[in-house]
Amino acid sequence: MSRTLRWVLGLLLVAGLLIGAFLYLPFRSWLPGGTVGDVSTRLVVNGPAFNPLFPKPHPGEQLIFTQEKRGFSQARLKEGDTVKALLSISDVITSPATRAKFSGATQELREWPLVDQGSQASALLVADRFQVKVIGQGAGLTPEDRHDLINAFDLKALAALKPATGSEPRALPAGKGSPLKLPPPRRQQAAAPTAPTAKSAVLEPAA
């Protein structure tokens, strides 16, 4: 192999590795391995699972998702060209410090701790696992408006949400499962003796 050809093949190999790494990075958090905040990704709910639980926009409003990653999803609530609020759900299994902020909560929503964070944000800790947060934008929203938006999430479904760990049992291919239990064979009943026919009768000698 010529020296020039070896250089060309080497450059192609390096280019292939760089392209592969570039394509891999955006999807790294979707893959089964790795960690998020030192927690295995198998234990963290993936962002797209949160999306159906966001509030349904009213006529004239739009809900535009801006971030989806392992353990987090965020959307903008727009009315016309104006962004009214940022809405998000996060799996705080990766952030004990976030969960600890609710320990001194003096408000509740559906028996879950609710806190106002500054003048623009409110957050709810659902099932000691998921933070639902609303941040007012521009002129902002009143605390009551933010609380109403939080209450518009499907909080019941969120409380029951579990990570897709991939541990569900898979169906075994044919012939690989437990042996089949066949019913015991039926016993054949003995046939009743039949009367001898003329052909099969034994002739006795005459006396």
Image: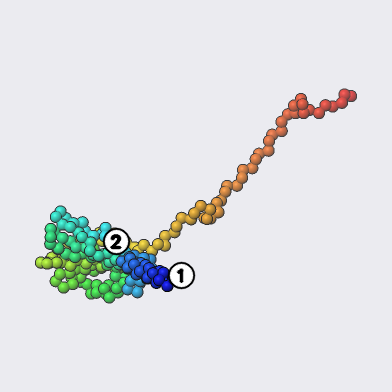
Q: Which residue is drawn at 42% across and 72% down?
A: 3
Q: Which residue lies furthest to the right in this view?
A: 207
Q: Name the residue under label 1.
A: 1
- Checking the image for residue 185, the label placed there is none
Instruction: Report the Cα–Cα distance between label 2 and label 1.
Output: 50 Å
Where does the image place residue 192, in percent across and percent down from the top left?
Answer: 69, 34
In this rendering, position of residue 71 left or right of residue 168: left
Query: Relative to residue 196, is residue 179 drawn left or right?
Result: left
Q: Identify the image's colour scheme: rainbow, by chain, secondary structure or one colour.
A: rainbow
Q: Nearer the viewer, residue 33 or 187?
A: 33
Q: Which residue type does callout 2 highlight? A: Pro
Amino acid type, mark 1: Met
Q: Residue 206: which quarter of the image?
A: top right
Q: Which of marks 2 and 1 is nearer the N terminus?
A: 1
With 161 as the anchor, is 202 left or right in this view?
right
The residue nearer to you, when weighing 23 against 19, is: 19
x 57%, y 48%: residue? 182
Vertical placement of residue 100 versus 132, above or below? below
**CB under 8 Å between discs 2 and 1:** no
- Does residue 118 sit above or below 183 in this rendering? below
In the rendering, at what x and y percent does residue 25 appear?
32, 68
Label 1 sits on a secondary structure element that is: loop
Q: Please state which of residues 144 and 48 is positioned toward the viewer in this rendering.
A: 48
Q: Residue furthest left?
A: 139
Residue at the disc numbered 2:
48
Image vertical order of residue 100 relative to residue 202, above or below: below
Query: Is residue 168 among what the camera can see?
Result: yes
At numbered mark 2, what does the secondary structure look like: helix, strand or loop?
helix
Q: Residue at x 36, y 62 (%)?
A: 164
At a point 15% along the width and 69% down the height, the residue shown is 120
**Which quadrant does the C terminus fall into?**
top right
